Image (tube, rainbow, N blue to C red):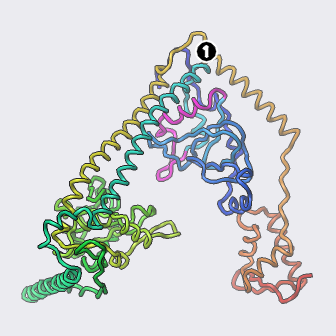
Amino acid sequence: MTDIPRGWAEAPLDDICEILDFKRIPINSQERKQRIEGKSSDELFPYYGATGQVDVIDGYLFEGQHVLIGEDGAPFLDRIKPKAYLVDGKFWVNNHAHIVRALGDNRYLCHYLNFIRYEEHVTGTTRLKLTKSALVAIPILVPPLKEQRRIVKKIEALFDEVDKGVECLNAARASLVLYRQSLLKAAFEGRLTADWRTKNADKLEDTETLLARIRFERKFRYQAALEVWEKAVSDWRINGEIGKKPPKPKKPKEISAEEKSTGAPGWTELPLGLLIDEPAYGTSKKSDYNGGETGVLRIPNIAAGVIDADDLKSANFDESEIDQYRLIEGDVLTIRSNGSISLVGKPALVRSVDTQFVFAGYLIRLRSIQGSLMPEYLVYVMMEPRVRAQIESNAKSTSGVNNINAKELQQLEVPICTFAEQIEIVRLLDAQLDGVKVLEGEIDAGLKRADALRQSILKKAFAGELVSQDPEDENAKMLLERIKVEKAENERTAKRTRKSNPVRKAAARRPTLTDLIKVLEKHKGWVAASKAAMELKVADGATSDEVEVFYRQLKDYLERGLIEVERRGDEDWLRRAKVEVG
C-alpha cells in the first residue's frame, strides 16, 4: 500500500507484536486421546491448528486473547477464507499456527491479516508455508490505538448485518434441499403421478407384466448387440483381418428379482442391474490440462445432474481406447470413490455435446436399457432419499475413502414403473426442480455478494475511510514508540525470569523391567528389539542417553534369564522367557 491515511504509520508486524511460536508444542492424536480419556469437559482446553480448533487437551500453554495465523495448511491464496483467527481464554497450539499477541488491538490485527494478499509472503507449491521470517516482515498499516478500536467496532457491526443476511440465505438453501427431497420422495412413491395414472389407465402394466417386459428387453438388447458383433467380425474377416478382432459383447449376468408392489398401481422395486447394461469403469490413463487431444471427464465435471466441462483435462488415446471409454447421449456417469460420502454415487447425464469426451477411472458409466429405463429418470432416482441411503450404506468406509463398485450399483433396489409414466415423472420433476435451480443460483449469487461485501468493508477500513479520524487521538508514530519501549521491557522481564527460573529438562523415564515384560507378553512370541524399543517410546527422536538406558537394562534382563534373544539377520529378536518375574 502506498497511500497511508493521515495520522497512521506503517511498520513490520514484528514491531507491533510479540511472536510466541517458541511456546507451542505439537501433540499427536494418539497421545491426546490417552491424555483426555476419562476426564470431564471442565478439565479440557481447546487444541488449535492452522485454521481453527482441531481437538481438546488436558492442559494449556497460553492464556488470554491472541491471534493465530496458519503457518502451513491455511488457504493463503483464497481471498475469502480466513487465514487468521482470534482466540481467548486458556488454550494449546500445535506447530501449524503462528501465535501472535498485538501490542495494540488484537482484533484489528486479525482483520488486517485476513484482508492482505499472501502471494509474496508464502513459499512452496502444493502446500504453501508462511515462515516466521516472512510473517514478521509483513507490513502493517497502524492507525492510532483509539481509531483501531473504532474501526474494529464498525467492522464487526457491519459484519453482523452481513452474517444475518447469510444466515437467511443458508436457511433458504436448507429449505430448498428439504423441498427437493420431499418432491423426489413423492415422485418415486407414485404420488406425484397419481392423477396421470387415473387419466392413462390404458398405459399401465401390472408388476408381473412389467417385470416380464424388462427381462425381455434385456435379452433382446443382448441379441441385437450379438448380431451387430457377428456382422462386424464378418466384415473384419472379409477385409483381411486387419487390426484387432471386434470384441464379443458380454452376456448379461443373471439377476434374480421378484415383482413386489410398492403401494402405487403398476409400481415395483427392482435391482438396478436389470435396467442397465454392465457398468463400465473409466480410464486410468493420466490426464492433464492440455495433455492431449481427447478431453477426460473427472469428478469435478460431475455437476448437479449434468456434465460441466469447464475444468477439463485431456490425454491421447488410441482407437481401441476411444471405443472402450466412448460415451453416447443418454449415458449416466456417477462418482465411485471420494472422501466425501455425499459425492459418492452422484449422477450426471451425458448430453450430445459431451460425447466427444472419455471418462476417468473414479467414474462409472451406467447405460440404460432402452424401453425399460429412461436416462433422465435414472439420474433423478439416484438422488431419491431411499436410494441415496442405500448408496451411502454401501460406500461408507472407516479408511477415509468411500467407495461403491459396479456390483453394488447393480444391486441397488430402485422404484420402477412403466416407461410412459417415467416420461411423465421426468417432465414434472424438470418443471418443478428448474425453479429450485433458479432459486439456488440466486442464493449462490447472494452468498458471493456477501463475501465481496466483507472484502469491501475491510478495504474501506484499511484505507481510513470507514470511521472518522479524531485529531485528539495519539499519533500512530507515538504509539509505535510506546510499543517499542513496552516490547523492550517485556524482553528484559522475560530474560530475568529465565535466569531466576532456569528450565530444567525432565529426566528421561527409564524403561522398567515391568514395561518391557508387558510388551513381550503382549506379542506372545518373538518381536524385533527395535519394535520393542519403539513401544517403550525409545525410538527415532530419542536421546542417546535414553537408548543407552534401554539397552543396558535389556542386557540385565538377559543375564537374569527373564528374556530370550535370537539373532535374525542384522537385528536381535526378543521374547519373554518362561520364568516368573520376581
Question: Is residue 249 depicted above or below 58 in this figure?
Answer: below
Name the residue at 31% across, 78% down: 271
The quarter of the picture where residue 414 lies is bottom left
Instruction: Give me the residue at 67% from left, 36% from top.
Output: 65
Q: Can you identify the residue that label 1 sits on?
A: 475
* Callout 1 secondary element: loop
Residue 251 falls in image quadrant: bottom left
Depth check: give the residue in front, 214 or 112.
214
Coordinates of residue 344 in the picture (x, y in percent): 39, 65
- Rendered view: 382 above or below 258: above
Q: Amino acid at mark 1?
A: Asn
Res 318 visible? no
Instruction: Describe residue 489's horizontal placement relative to residue 183 as left or right.
Output: right
Magenta stretch: give its range. Answer: 103-129
Q: Position of residue 121 (x, y in %)?
A: 51, 39
Please, is residue 258 above or below residue 99 in the view?
below
Residue 493 percent across, percent down from the top left: 81, 32
